[in-house]
Amino acid sequence: MRANKRIRVLIFTKYTLFREGIKELLIHTDLIEVAGEAVTMGEALGLLRLLSPDVILMDPIASDLSGADVMRRFKAASPDVKVLLLSMSTDESVIGACIRAGASGYISSTDRPAQLRNAIAACAERGRRAA
């Protein structure tokens, strides 16, 4: 990834207001591009393959599958994809299972917008260094 390229983010959550609010926060920065949005696991996997986002921003409890199962499917489809968990949940068992399954990090939905942008950038940067 070139240093001047915007970070392409795929937002995955079934909650419309949450998804739209996050998108609105992210579109007002030169650093991040919202590449796509997914409501279902099938949509998310399809967009992952089609769009090759740098980071998937995912609510680990907003799917019919467990967050860890979602992570395993993402990693099977694209081993290098970075996934940042964004959730109201502070359930350490859920967050921990997702991290063990391959998530790159976690940020609480109660954090400030700048913290979200910084977390996305840090997540993408770890991917650049590893590549």
Image (tube, rainbow, N blue to C red):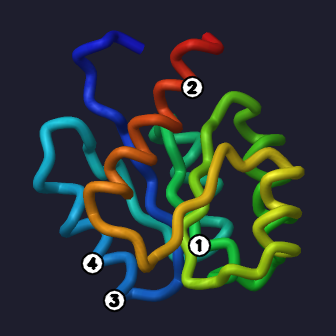
Kindly indicate the quadrant of the structure image that contains residue 4: top left
- Amino acid on which the number 4 mark rests in the picture: Gly
Mark 4 or mark 2, earlier in chain: 4
Q: CA distance from mark 3 to mark 1?
A: 13 Å
Is label 4 in a helix, a strand or a loop? helix
Say whether marks 1 and 4 touch (CB < 8 Å). Answer: no
Q: CA distance from mark 3 to mark 2?
A: 29 Å
- Amino acid on which the number 1 mark rests in the picture: Asp
Q: Count residues near mark 3 (Cα–Cα under 10 Å), then give few for <14, some for 14-19, many for 20+.
A: few
Is label 1 in a helix, a strand or a loop? loop
Q: Which quarter of the image is occupied by the N terminus?
A: top left
Q: CA distance from mark 1 to mark 2?
A: 20 Å
Kindly indicate the quadrant of the structure image that contains residue 127: top right
Say whether marks 3 and 2 touch (CB < 8 Å). Answer: no
Mark 1 or mark 2, earlier in chain: 1
Q: Count residues near mark 2 (Cα–Cα under 10 Å), then give few for <14, some for 14-19, many for 20+.
A: few
Q: CA distance from mark 1 to mark 4?
A: 13 Å
Residue shown at 34% from the left, 34% from the top: 7
- Looking at the image, residue 9 lies above or below residue 78: below
Q: Which residue is mark 2?
A: 126
Mark 3 or mark 1, earlier in chain: 3
Left or right for 95, reference 11: right
Q: Which residue is mark 1?
A: 59
Q: Position of residue 58 (x, y in %)?
A: 57, 64
Q: CA distance from mark 4 to mark 2?
A: 26 Å
Q: Which residue is mark 4?
A: 21
Q: Which quarter of the image is occupied by the C terminus?
A: top right
Q: Position of residue 16 (x, y in %)?
A: 38, 87
